[in-house]
Amino acid sequence: MDKSRLSYIAAPMVNQSDLPFRLLVRKYGATLAYTQMLLPSKLLNDRDYLDFHQRDLSIASTLGELGNGTPVVVQLCGDDPEMIVSAGKKLQGYCDAIDLNLGCPQEAAREGHYGAYLLGPKDRKLVQDIVSDMSNSLTVPISVKLRLCNPAPSTIDLGLSLEACGASWVALHARTISARNRRKGAADLSVVKNLKEALTIPVVSNGNVRQWQDLQKNLEVTGADGVMVGETLLGNPCIFAGVNPDPFQISLEYLDLCRQYPETVTIPIVQSHIRHFVDFKLGRRPWYKKFRATIGECQTLDDIQAHIVGWMKTLKVYDNAGPADCDSNATRDGDDDDTADIDLTSLW
Ligand SMILES: Cc1cc2nc3c(=O)[nH]c(=O)nc-3n(C[C@H](O)[C@H](O)[C@H](O)COP(=O)(O)O)c2cc1C
């Protein structure tokens, strides 16, 4: 993959990296989008799960770069090299690269022995085998997304070994596994910088981007080849374009994409995207709780659209302050970073 594609990356996010959302962020400046983490055992044993994701990716690949469907990276997790390779073979024809998840901090990952629970020294050989087997057996480039190891300097050794095993790039979410809640600490970008200096392959920096200016700052501090954004992109899908969109307009644009590509996303996921868009800017407005609740009651895309249009007409904020009057620091109590609160065993 052309290195310039690594500049601005939409992070993998369980239940949030659906096709319409990926198309939206690609339209607004993301140079590359990841799928959510997919489970190899389900790709191999659950026909509906495989069909769903193959269909999503085949639409994306038909749309191609011009239609914002590609480039796309499929993310897999797991601890069984053979199973990961077999699952990768099912999807390699529809994507530009396949990524190994070494960052998931969820309980399910601990129980299943994957994600960030493979970062310790005892699993180093296993990780090397997985990445070697992937890069020797699959036809697309292999990347790895990892968290900080403990102690942090050992992240560099891991990066060097991933490079030696054939990884084409690595993305470092510079927080340790214990920093599940983003408010527990900033990402340690100094390790991204050290990793970049140590490796020959491209390094992507992930963490600490809250607004457009942070993108440039992050790249300056780390010297990385690109920056990956997760949570902030959920609130502002246009951050890479330096645009601060009207949350209701961007919701309508997202709904259009959902309508254009039916059955690529469920209603609960659509509702969650809409809430993120509006919450990001207007989450502290007195009416927000009611807005959130009414969106939650909608059963169809048409319902959601009608509610949004209704709120746009009603809200005084539009008459008085205008959509640019926002509170981008609004936070949602209880919202965790990463895949917290998400049912990883569901179809998605
Ligand atoms: C809702 C949500 C789901 C996530 N799902 C995944 C995932 O499937 N795979 C993964 O590697 N990371 C996942 N992450 C972590 C992000 O990719 C990213 O590493 C993390 O949020 C830090 O970046 P940020 O500070 O820009 O959000 C998820 C994060 C969020 C908020």
Image: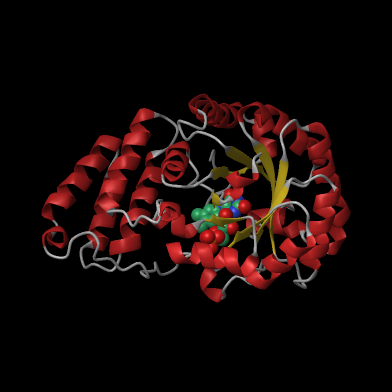
| Residue 145 screen position, x and y as percent | 67, 53
- Please state the horizontal and vertical placement of residue 345, each as a whole percent of the image: 58, 45
Front-most of residues 18 and 204: 204
* Nearer to me, 348 or 168: 168
Outermost residue to the bottom: 185
In terms of image quadrants, where is residue 85?
top right
- Left or right of residue 20, residue 100 in this image: right
Q: Quadrant of ligand 1?
A: bottom right
Is 83 in front, or is 124? 124
Asked if residue 304 lies left or right of residue 96, the reply is: left
Within the image, what quadrant is residue 39 found in?
Answer: top right
Horizontal relation, residue 229 to residue 318: left or right: right
- Whether residue 337 is visible here, answered yes or no, is no
Residue at 73 percent across and 59 percent down: it is 117
Q: Tell me the residue at 65%/30% (across/down).
A: 91
Display coloring: secondary structure
Q: Is residue 122 above or below residue 13?
A: below
Residue 242 in view here: yes
Q: Is residue 140 above or below residue 25?
A: above
Considering only vertical position in the picture, is 327 above or below 201?
below
The one nearer the camera, 69 or 340, is 69
Number of numbered discs on residues: 0
Residue sitting at 75 percent across and 64 percent down?
197
* The N terminus lies in quadrant: top right
From the viewer's perspective, tell me whether residue 190 is left or right of residue 15.
Answer: right
Image location of residue 114, percent across then percent down:
72, 52
Q: Position of residue 275 (x, y in %)?
A: 34, 54
